Image: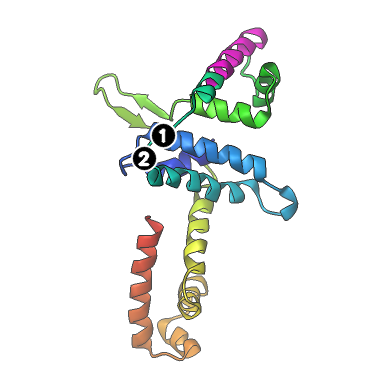
Amino acid sequence: MGLVHLCARRFLGRGVEYDDLFQAGCVGLVKAAENFDAARGVKFSTYAVPVILGEVRRLFRDGGALRVSRGLRDLARRAGEEADRLRQETGKAPGVGQIAQGLGISVEKAALALGVGQSPLSLTDREEGGELDVPVEAPEERMTERLTLYQILQNLEERDRSLIQYRYFQGKTQTETAALLGMTQVQVSRREKKLLAAMRAAFNQ
């Protein structure tokens, strides 16, 4: 769930309520869980982040509102009731598998229902009447940034990609980079500035 909060927070302030961002991220998380293939040698978090981001971005393509079916809302209510019942019986929070078993549904559907019914991670400031965003510390945060950066680099032309790799991944000077690419130091400097500006803009999209 930390991944969902992490991805949803990237779209704050763009005209869509955090509740909708979070719920769309939950849908993406469940889709990632259903389609993940561990045999490919990729970590789940690495696979899940682009899927979650894709579902959140779909909100904006669909007009900025997440449409949750009546059936899913009903399932979310039942999942919440089942979780409360199990908590009272056992004295501890139940797992998704236990809730799924109690409802006679798949683990994926139970996870989706719980995600839809869960409130976003925020607290109400009773004195101010506003909301306090609670940061979610997740070890995947830097991984998400690296994934985004990797995608941006892959979209660059080969020469531009090499320039960035020489300068920022291999620590070469502009003069050394110019010699490797058959350019002048001035050309490298100008091109580097343009590339960095374009990459920053792409990173913030």
Residue 135 visible in the displayed image: no
Left or right: where 80 falls relative to 44:
left
Q: Which residue is mark 1?
A: 20
Q: Residue furthest right?
A: 39
Check the image and report above or below for 148 versus 7: below
**What colouring method underlies this structural image?**
rainbow
Task: Tell me the quarter of the image containing the N terminus.
Answer: top right
Image coords of residue 84 (percent x, y): 58, 12
Give whichever of 76, 67 is nearer the camera: 67
Q: Residue furthest top?
A: 89
Q: Quadrant of residue 29?
A: top right
Q: Quadrant of residue 203?
A: bottom left
Q: What's under tag 2, amino acid-wise? A: Gly
Tell whether position 146 is magenta: no
Task: Tell me the quarter of the image containing the C terminus.
Answer: bottom left
Q: Which residues are magenta?
A: 76-91
Asked if marks 1 and 2 touch (Cβ < 8 Å), the reply is yes
Calculate the distance from the C-alpha at mark 1 to the C-alpha at mark 2: 8 Å
Q: Which residue is mark 2?
A: 64
Residue sitting at x 65%, y 24%: 95
Dot 2 lies on which element? loop
Disc with the residue nearer the chain's start (1 vs 2): 1
Q: What's under tag 1, amino acid-wise? A: Asp
Residue sitting at x 65%, y 50%: 43
Q: Residues within 10 Å of mark 2 (few under 14, many from 20)?
A: some
